[in-house]
Amino acid sequence: MPRSVKPLNATQVDKAKPKDKEYNLSDGQGLALRIKPNGTKVWLFNYTHPFSKKRKNLSFGQYPIVSLVDARRLRLENLELLAKNIDPKEHRDQILLTRMNAAKNTFEAVANQWLELHKTKVKKNTAEAILRSLENDVFGAVGAMPIDQVSFSIIKRLVIAKLVDRGSLEIARKVARRINQIMSFAVLNEYIPLNPLTEIGKLIPASKAQNLAALKANELPELMSKVNLSDMKRQTRCLLELQLHTMTRPGEAATIKWSEVDFAEQVWVIPAEKMKMGKEHRVPLTKQTLAILNYMKSISGHREYVFPSVKNPRGHANRETVNKALGRIGFKGRTVAHGFRSLASTTLNESGFEPDVIEAALAHLDPNKVRAAYNRADYFEKRKVMMCWWSNFIESAAQGNLSAVASEAA
């Protein structure tokens, strides 16, 4: 029969004096107060490991920081763990490790880990866009927060609600998807037990589909006239006209490199990593587009990019350059740079060109995956003819002398 131990009282604990050697005052059930020769008093919990059956000590901390009442509460908690065959010391160490990892694994740190992995699955400019999105709309709110403290209500209030309130519904949807992916990544890496944000996207209201503003063919002369009469920088005008003639996306035109242009073959080869669909795209160059490029050679032929950045000549022009220029000459709300593609598509379709050839010129992938698997033609020769017609149509709309490089193209 176990020896009965009389519990300690507060006076005994408080008045216990140091001796030449350390000694213990037992409170029973494994709890004891150890008094050291220097006067320090430490609570110890002595127990038997549930599997090894070895005796072990676990410190509960110093008295009076940890009171007798607190020490007894901790004893009870650890006895409950032992009843479940859980070693108290191992349990405490695991909790400490989890908290240390949580402090180290902030949302931003985990997001950067996820992005490093995600970079291997997406194009470079996509990864850069994702990072900018997180920096602009997420990190400022929750970046420094431990990943295990990021909750549904926090993301709802500090991130999603703010995006919805400013009307950025599509951005909100993208941000919600990215946060969700980061939290799922955290689960897979055992930083958190579960992802509390799986339903966060349902908070975002549906947005009405809006087509990008684009001009009609009969409005093209007005555009060319206003471009000609404006005080637009020559380089900006050339960028605008190159994009209009080539039917390319703003980012593709703004980042064109001299190394992508083959003057002998009269073709601009856009590498796959720059294309939205991740597939190399060849653009036939007409006499008008060649004239634009030859004009730019005198300005930037010694640089990497055809259209250098004004702020950093070693970089490329901003993708929004043409949009801003269109706004300044009175076309805000009427068209955007991307709308040039819609203008070209509508005009070419109405003029009887083959839809497949037009879609190839726009670098669109066939939505029918089975058909696309068999139809790998890029209709390059047919596109040469069509692109020449389109450039001549633009020049005709400009009435022969309003193009930025009309004299060179003549």
Image: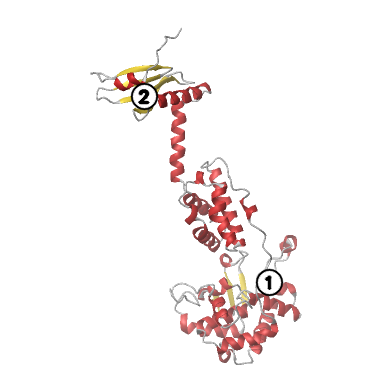
Q: Is residue 28 left or right of residue 150?
A: left
Q: Given the current orientation, which residue lies at the most extreme left position?
A: 20
- Considering only vertical position in the picture, is 397 above or below 47? below
Q: Residue at x 68, y 78 (%)?
A: 344
Q: What amino acid type should be assigned to the residue bearing mark 1?
A: Ala
Where, by quadrant of the figure, is residue 386 drawn? Answer: bottom right
Q: Quickly name the residue at label 1.
A: 360
Q: Position of residue 333 (x, y in %)?
A: 62, 76
- Whether residue 371 is visible, yes or no, is yes
- Considering only vertical position in the picture, is 226 above or below 179? below
Q: Is residue 343 left or right of residue 179?
A: right
Q: Quickly name the residue at label 2.
A: 43
Where, by quadrant of the figure, is residue 167 drawn? Answer: bottom right
Secondary structure beneath dot 2 equals strand
Count of picture labels: 2
Quadrant containing the C terminus is bottom right
Q: Is residue 308 left or right of residue 278?
A: left
Q: Is residue 315 left or right of residue 206?
A: left
Q: Position of residue 404 (x, y in %)?
A: 56, 87
- Considering only vertical position in the picture, is 272 above or below 233? above
